[in-house]
Image (spheres, rainbow, N blue to C red):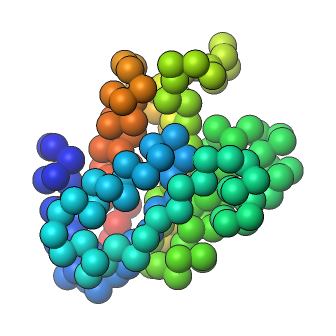
Amino acid sequence: MGTQNLVKKLATQFVKQSKTLGFAESCTGGKLCAAVTSVSGSSKYFLGGLVCYANQTKHDLLGVNFGAIKIHGAVSKAVAMAMAKGAKKRLKVDWAVSVTGIAGPKGGSKTKPVGLVFFAVAGPKVVRGTHRIFKGSRGMIQKQAVDFALKLLLKNFK
């Protein structure tokens, strides 16, 4: 399913249930927000997103603990979950999704290769984190991350 169709499906479900949505993005740099707002009517459920690229910004805007960043790294399940919880709280939304990873082409390591992306979904009764390793160019990794984030939200939204 293409990005536009994922967004349309998401919009239908959020509007039908009168729920709100927000994002916390790092490696996707606002592309998740752009995908949602590219479909007319997104203002009925999408309240906004925070692009928190630097660790300081993750801390200042989302409340991510520096200890978690030091122990696990900015690209980790723990930080993705803290980002999602922080976005949910700061944006005052019912649901929040976060994305943090290494889009490349540089910055990877043996334990955290280019293409490694962590995601988290925070809803009324759930906070779940997961990760994927995507292949391709920086743009391709970002596109795959956006689509996966939308699918993850649809899977967890109830």
Quadrant assignment for the N terminus: top left
Does 125 sit above or below residue 140? below
Does 92 sit above or below residue 78? below
Quadrant assignment for the C terminus: bottom left
Q: Is residue 42 left or right of residue 108?
A: left
Where in the figure is residue 99, as x and y percent of width and height? 51, 48
Q: Is residue 100 left or right of residue 64?
A: left
The residue depicted at 33 percent of the width and 28 percent of the height is 140
Q: Toward the viewer: 30 or 157? A: 30
Where in the figure is residue 91, as x and y percent of width and height? 53, 77
* Residue 125 is at least partly visible in this image: no
Where in the figure is residue 48, as x and y percent of width and height? 43, 70
Farthest bottom residue in view: 18
Does 101 sit above or below residue 6? above
The residue depicted at 34 percent of the width and 81 percent of the height is 19
Q: Toward the viewer: 4 or 138? A: 138
How many numbered discs, if any? 0
The residue depicted at 29 percent of the width and 86 percent of the height is 18
* Residue 47 is at least partly visible in this image: yes
- Quarter-wise, where is residue 101 in the image? top right
Where in the figure is residue 61, as x and y percent of width and height? 67, 66
Farthest top residue in view: 110
The residue depicted at 47 percent of the width and 79 percent of the height is 93
Q: Toward the viewer: 20 or 137? A: 137
Q: Is residue 102 left or right of residue 41?
A: right
